[in-house]
Amino acid sequence: MESGINPNNEKKVQRIEGMTLRQALEEYLKANKDLSERTAKDYQNVLNRYAGNPDKYPYMNWMDGPISAITSKIFKQAYQRLGVSTPSGAEHLRSALHVICEYALEQYDGEIISLNPARIRKEFRYKSKPMHRRIADEHLPAFFHAMDKLEGFQGRVSSDYFLFTLLNGLRKSESANLKWSDVNLKENTFTVFKTKNKNPHILPCTKQALAIINRRLTSKTNEYVFPRIDGTGSVKDPRKQLMKVIALMNLEVSPQTPLPKLKNGYFAENDLPKIYFTPHDLRRTFAGIAKQVISGDWISRLLNHISEQPGAAVTKRHYMGHEYVADLYKPLQAVADKIDSFANRANK
């Protein structure tokens, strides 16, 4: 202090200069408490997968090194190199790193980094191709037959979970997070509160959905409609059950074709069976079937897509109550019946 040096300032400078990407990520997550759990996990996963995996990606071992060492030149070289094999992965990495670096820039007024290394002009970024994968109409009977063959408590819960997701066009987390308190059996509706656009999504119960809900009610173990077998929460990633479904479907459609082997519960990306899908593809399957029986406007409303019209979200949230939900019953029931007809289950 006598020499004019404030030790606290010196410590601050040392901390700032040595701040790692991991520390910046942790600070960002603590400072943004309203960030959705899914988004927070996505940032952690993508940065750890690529920037914290030196054995596989030695050219971007950044997580525990100073964030200031990631220059624009270094990042662009890594981004282009990763993009050769995984363009979507490179873009996910760029997006996550951009968010963390923007936070560091604003929070520390340029003391850590003076430029965001992940800033790449839009025309030079890797373009993510929209996914169109879904269960083909002709494979739906095999899908339903596979559902019927899942055994045990978790098998039956998973079967109902997959069917409920398909019949209502939900995202996998929307079905998984559904609680009994979200189900109104007097009105025959259920509400998804944790949605991508953060607007609660109320849907009427079709005859098929109501049958699933009543079936789950008889085996209720906790607050979730689709519980985990140990009773600690809800189904999160029923990967093993989904792999059983896919295997059963492939054996039914092509009994002479051997299935690729599983590695860590997954099929290798370059060695997928003929019929393959993920939980999110059930939502696409719903949309594909819905196109055959209802209009695009109804599909958007059932999928909880926000209209581009100004004030559409506000209108839906504040002025469309039970009447709005009642309007959805007929088109949603039409889609559910169409799914049943494809699966040869209409009279079961």
Image (cartoon, rainbow, N blue to C red):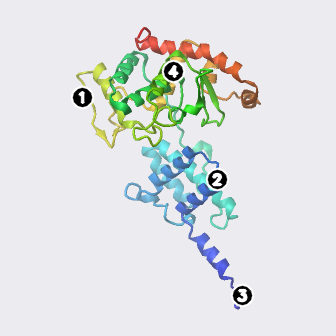
Task: Judge whether residue 332 can be spotted in this image.
Answer: yes
Q: Nearer the viewer, mark 1 or mark 2?
A: 2
The C terminus - image quarter: top left
Pointer 2 or 4: first along the chain: 2
Q: CA distance from mark 3 to mark 4?
A: 73 Å
How many marks the image carries: the answer is 4
Q: Is residue 3 above or below residue 242?
A: below
Q: Is residue 266 above or below residue 152?
A: below
How crowded pointer 1 is (Cα within 10 Å; few <14, some 14-19, many 20+) is rated as few
Q: In this rendering, would 280 be left or right of 250?
A: right
Pointer 1 or 3: first along the chain: 3
- What residue is disc 1 on? 258
Pointer 2 or 3: first along the chain: 3
Q: In this rendering, would 309 be left or right of 168?
A: right
Pointer 3 or 4: first along the chain: 3
* Labelled disc at residue 4: 3
User: 4 or 233: nearer the eye?
Assistant: 233
How crowded pointer 3 is (Cα within 10 Å; few <14, some 14-19, many 20+) is rated as few
Please name the residue shown 61% across and 13% down the image: 330
- What residue is disc 4 on? 209
User: 247 or 152: nearer the eye?
Assistant: 152
Where disc 4 sits, the SS reads helix
Pointer 4 or 1: first along the chain: 4
* Labelled disc at residue 32: 2
